[in-house]
Image (tube, grey):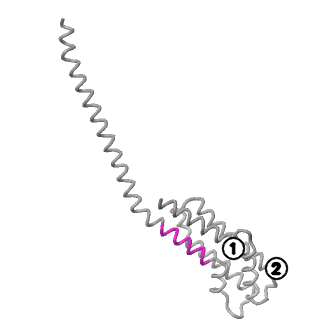
Amino acid sequence: MIFADILKIVLPALLVFLAGYLALWAMLRNERERRKAEHAYNVSKTTLPLRLQAYERLILLLERISPESIMVRLSRSGMTVAELQTALIATIRAEWEHNLSQQIYVGKEAWDLVRNAKESMVHIVNLCAEKLPPTDPALSLSQVVIDAVLNLDVNPISQAADGLKREVIDLLN
């Protein structure tokens, strides 16, 4: 009888406690998820413009080191193959160093594509310059480099730009 009386009091109290505990647990879990989502939103609101700017700068880097663009900017009348080769390599490396910090904001695959494009351009310039006498006019190096890039199965500059564009599309979706 005493046990039944105690059970009449304890059982409803336990049920009320359990219901309160579960409600409080669910409320705290929802609040934690809301804060997490809010934090993620605030981070993306801050970092998305920075990431997009990094992709823009890397596309600009690729454009600036593309053979058509860099040759027009650097070729001067009276330059020799050796002088143009030195100027091309120095400019490619300077452009690269100027944009090194952008790797923080882009994915590894995109960064690897950009790095490979830069290294390919340096390699192509050096290979083409080795084929020509250093004292020849710079125009001959320009033509050989552009022809070499046009004859590649896969243009590393275009491949890197396409990779960056794919990554931006993925980022925005």
Q: Secondary structure at mark 1?
A: helix
Position of residue 54 measured from the top left corner of the image (x, y, whole percent): 51, 68
Identify the residue position indicated by label 2 in the image.
131
Q: Residues within 10 Å of mark 1 (few under 14, many from 20)?
A: many
Residue 167: x and y in percent read 54, 62
Circle 1 residue: 121
Please rate how many residues cluster around mark 2, counting C-alpha atoms within 10 Å: few if below 14, some from 14 to 19, many from 20: few
Which residues are the magenta region?
52-64
> In the rendered view, does 119 fall on the left or right side of 31?
right
Q: Is residue 123 above or below residue 13?
A: below
- Asked whether residue 60 is drawn in magenta, I would say yes
Earlier in the chain: of badge 1 and badge 2, it is: 1
- Residue 138: assigned label: none
Q: Amino acid at mark 2?
A: Lys
Is 82 placed left or right of 1 in the picture? right
Give whichever of 99, 139 is nearer the camera. Answer: 139
- The percent position of residue 117, horizontal first and vertical second, equals 66, 69
Residue drawn at the location 70% of the way across and 81% of the way down: 86
Q: Residue at x 72, y 84 (%)?
A: 142
